[in-house]
Amino acid sequence: MKSGLDSGGPKQGPAMWGQWKTTEGGPEWVLANGRRRWAWPPVQKVVRLALRTNEKREKAGPVSRSVATTLRTREWPYHLAPPASLGERDAAVRLDHVTRRCHQKEMSTAAAPAGSAFPSFQLLVCGTLVAAVLGAAHRLGLFYRLMHKVDKVSIRHGGESVAAVLKAHGVKFLFTLVGGHISPLLVACEKLGIRVVDTRHEVTAVFAADAVARLTGTVGVVAVTAGPGLTNTVTAVKNAQIAQSPVLLLGGAASTLLQHRGALQAIDQMSLFRPLCKFCASVHRVRDIMPTLRTAMAAAQSGTPGPVFVELPIDVLYPYFMVQKEMVPAKPPKGLMGRAVYWYLENYLANLFAGAWEPRPEGPLPLDIPQASPQQVQRCVEILSRAKRPLVVLGSQALLPPTPASKLRPVVTLTSVYLDLQGCRGDSGCPLLPGRDGTGAAGPKPPPAHRQNRSAALKKADVVLLAGVVCDFRLSYGRVLSRSSKIIIVNRNRKEMLINSDMFWKPQEAVQGDVGSFVLKLVEGLQGQTWASDWAEELRQADQQKEKSFREKAMMPVSQHLNPVRVLQLVEETLPDNSILVVDGGDFVGTAAHLVQPRGPLCWLDPGAFGTLGVGAGFALGAKLCRPDTEVWCLFGDGAFGYSLIEFDTFVRHKIPVMALIGNDAGWTQISREQVPSLGSNVACGLAYTDYHKAAMGLGAQGLLLSRENEDQVVKVLRDAQQQCQDGHPVVVNILIGRTDFRDGSIAV
């Protein structure tokens, strides 16, 4: 059989004379004829140690050849390269090879006593064995258990540790779809006063947690079961990542002992979520639950916010006696192997619960939030102070903690010009101020946001402040910015901040830091600065001209049902000032973005840059829970409503009164607008004028219908829906609409 040294057996003759040499690959035997034989790895280790030892001895002084003399008493054909199948006895003989080659010159004085190689080798072997034993003991948790005991009679479970950390972080709601893997943490949260809200689909639970994160500035929390429970959340987690929403996803998992053994719903969940989350961790001991969750909560909010994932295997959540019953046999088996396995399982269980209930910190860890330097702020103040036509574009990050939205009003009041890019967290902009007359706003009446002709405004501005906005497709990758404009951009994420720069646009100042804090410092530096009012007036007149064309389109007849432009204008007139708009759809929602104005900061929730359909029910659920005294109006396309219909069962069970307005045009109209004229087919774009209001009634909600038959009663029906919501009922208003040319030319990709 061929060895690791060479193929074939030992060969005789002068050609086999050679010496040991140290190479990058390890010690090797170099023959006189130039051929090489690699040593067996254990032999390499022994020879490497011997070479180092002799090198040290040479530096220390002359060394006697007594070692070589002693070793030569053993029988060994020195003219042969050592074979690979030698035992411990022959390993010592190899030391003789090394010694002979390293000490060819005659040494004049004696140094080391005879036989000193044997204690060195024995010391090496003993040290290796001790290290192996200590490593095994550490891995088995034996050292930890010397100081930390296992409470075998306690009925406490890991779910209580999870709930304690969530409570200490101010979490009020936990969204879930129940599963056996996560039952202990759900029960524990309920006992601590955290409201557990179960949905009909896991993706809705994540969307609801996302809405809580956007509206409160804290971490939204969702818990789902293992396997398919987690895979169902992937779309919503990715949406939260792109929207920069701090969401904590708690996922159940198979027992730690049964990982990779074919357990029920056991998959490699960590690999699935690492690309989607800022932080991923799997808890393998009960004592690690609290520190892991605290780290995850801090990671979700630090830097650029985003989702985090913590995997909680089932055996770290249930109490000791239940895990023991499933893991360890009731009686020790007979036989040596059986007893060894039994001891291993008992030790594994003890290590799982050792120190589990010792007091540990539960509260929040410090957050790492980047800040702009004073020098950067000063340079931006100087650029803005010299501007003639300044323009402020406020994005999602402007509303992140620790800066309240109300404190950002002075910057737009100061410049008198800012763009409302219609949205909230995670989109291309945020409505910072009440849009119509500032009712309920603190401080002086702010200037209106400019919502129309945004591309023209960006082209004409000489200084543009992109505060929390990135130049992706929403700003045409930066092409809407003028080459002659001075661009100031501030963002927590440097990579996103500079996306597409030096291609279609170039920043004058790129500031990595918290947007809200930067804006406040900017306002402080610009105190007393004024700009000419003609620039703001020019943009205001452009807005008015565009809105006049909208009114004309609203009066145009449609072939059947109601004109959606007119319906949305009436919605705008009816919508109260203390309301939140949740939008989920394509064509109907795209039209609403031009016609329906948000009532204040954090009052418009859309999916953001990912363009995800199906966010409606989850966003509405989270929004109503966060602001129970606020009316939540949901604008759905009929296609998007298909994702959310079943969640009206959730609204009914949990007594969540929200109002859904469905723009029902019997199709995926945003797609067909482009597909039919360009490709000549409406395939897969057709739906039906379904009685969605009746389906909602079947789930226990209230349902109303708007069509051409009651065209003159649109406002009355909307008022009736409001009243039913105030009475505590979720309501669906099915609005049959026709098609207009309002959004002709818009594209869906």
Image (spheres, rainbow, N blue to C red):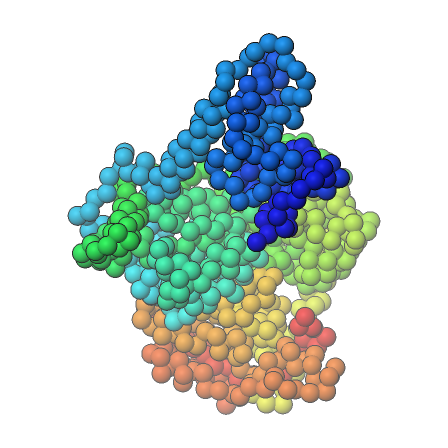
Out of 96 and 587, give the one closest to the viewer. Answer: 96
The picture quadrant where one finds residue 55 is top right
Left or right of 335 on screen, residue 443: right
Residue 77 at least partly seen = yes
Out of 186 and 271, give the one closest to the viewer. Answer: 271
Residue 631 at least partly seen = no
Residue lying at 58% horizontally and 83% vertically, measured from the top left = 667
Residue lying at 23% horizontally and 43% vertically, measured from the top left = 150
Question: Which quadrant of the rendered structure holds the C terminus?
Answer: bottom right
Residue lying at 47% horizontally and 37% vertically, measured from the top left = 88
Out of 102 and 168, give the one closest to the viewer. Answer: 102
Left or right of 228 on screen, residue 604: right
Left or right of 475 on screen, residue 322: left
326 in relation to 698, above or below? above
Residue 41, given in percent of the width and then of the height, sits at 56, 42
The picture quadrant where one finds residue 742 is bottom right
65 in relation to 381, above or below? above
Residue 639, given in percent of the width and then of the height, sits at 54, 78
Residue lying at 65% horizontally and 35% vertically, measured from the top left = 79
Residue 235, given in percent of the width and then of the height, sits at 52, 65
The picture quadrant where one finds residue 679 is bottom right
* Residue furthest right in the image: 484
